[in-house]
Amino acid sequence: MSEPLYKRQRHPLLIVISGPSGVGKDTVLQRMKEREVPMHFVVTATTRAARPGEVNGVDYIFVSNDEFAEMIEENELLEHAIVYGDYKGIPKQQVRDAMASGKDVIMRIDVQGAATIRKLCPDALLIFLTAGTEEELVQRLTDRKTETPEGIKLRIATARKEMKRIDEFDYCVFNPEMHLDTAVDAVLSIIEAEHNRVTPRVVSL
Amino acid sequence: MSEPLYKRQRHPLLIVISGPSGVGKDTVLQRMKEREVPMHFVVTATTRAARPGEVNGVDYIFVSNDEFAEMIEENELLEHAIVYGDYKGIPKQQVRDAMASGKDVIMRIDVQGAATIRKLCPDALLIFLTAGTEEELVQRLTDRKTETPEGIKLRIATARKEMKRIDEFDYCVFNPEMHLDTAVDAVLSIIEAEHNRVTPRVVSL
């Protein structure tokens, strides 16, 4: 076997899936897990209550306000924010360990948090997920049965502002109703393409 | 039906598949055609003789030296070059017409020609195709049964120089022996990803 013509070092990607509340961030990630896409799915720490079916340590790391405060103090979070009254944060060591093992890392995060990740790590790969229409957002938030009418109103008003921040992202993927697998395929294409870039994204945390 | 949350204008891509001789540019494009990928495949004008099985107007536009000279004089070519003693050129109007109809346009072109396209059109999408090893290149060039030993030697020496120009490209895709469909999938992922970029490539010719 002769020498390869071209050697490429594989750099793991730090992938952020963001977008307004109700756009389907969790659903897209869930489908990627079901398809057994080989990457590390970040388990976010949160102080919010588990929704029906959510499992601690799998869907989120559910912690008390005190525990969350301690994580902040100990500088254990890559990023954290209050999202609709609940704290959410990305455990730093979890991300570092996964990337050190060579795995791509993917996380869902709100639009403001994505901007924070970009500042920390300019080479992060930021994907903005969007629904087809505002009505779809309202429908999805209603279907959750965990949001009050006021909560939905607040999320829609926020969504309108967040839509104006698309330019801060690298890619925008549509996740319209009934086309989940198309959205997942689009995300997977982006990840594959990014690994074939001549100038790779190099993430250091 | 309410207004879409986000409107995106679709910009057709100008896609260049390049790389050393024998790397499989024609084979990749051929497989894309077989898969009926919806885009315009540029038919290059050339003065070289048709290889067995090649069809005029489909694989290439085969022209005489005089006809080629006239195309140059009339400024009908986007780019042209002497490639291993034969003239090859990209008919400008063909590319313009396809893009005006909204289609992505894909063309195969040597490494020097790709650099010319980049100068003409900074937003062109340049993909460098590479084989696994130099031995593979030699094998493919030998299999053509149209290259002399001297011709193969010249192509390999050129390939070594061309490999150093990868940095001028956007993406690099491996096309190792027996993995043609993997290479084609990688090219298709790049194209899909590029259409989901927040900042699109905007080509004007």
Image (cartoon, coloured by chain):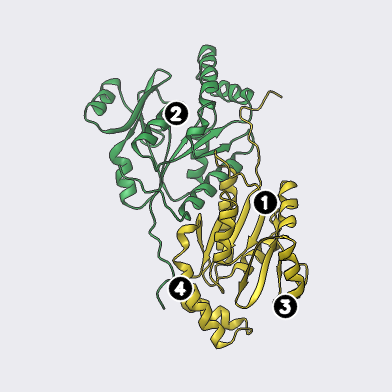
Chain colours: A yellow, B green
Q: CA distance from mark 2 to mark 1?
A: 33 Å
Residue A203, position as x, y percentages in the image: 63, 47
State how far apart marks 3 and 1 are (Cα): 26 Å
**Label 2 is placed on what type of residue?**
Asp
Q: Nearer the viewer, residue A155 or B200?
A: A155
Question: In this figure, which residue is indicated by the disc labeled 4?
Answer: A160
Location of mark 1 (residue): A104
Q: Which residue matches tag 2?
A: B110
Q: Are the two marked residues, 2 and 3, in contact with CB atoms closer than 8 angstroms?
A: no
Q: CA distance from mark 1 to mark 4?
A: 31 Å
Q: Secondary structure at mark 2?
A: loop
Residue occupying image coordinates x 69% and y 23%: A2
Name the mark nearer the viewer: 2 or 1: 1
**Which of the 4 image quadrants contains residue B174?**
top right
Q: Which mark is residue B190?
A: none
Give the amino acid at mark 1: Asp
Distance of label 4 from label 3 (alpha carbons): 27 Å
Other-residue count near label 4 (Cα within 10 Å), few / some / many at <14 / 14–19 / ≥20: few
For image coordinates 52% across by 21% down, the residue present is: B161
Q: Nearer the viewer, mark 2 or mark 3?
A: 3
Circle 4 sits in a helix, a strand or a loop, which is it? helix
Q: Is residue B75 found left or right of B44 in the rendered image? A: left
Residue at the disc numbered 3 = A50
Q: Are marks 2 and 3 on the same chain?
A: no
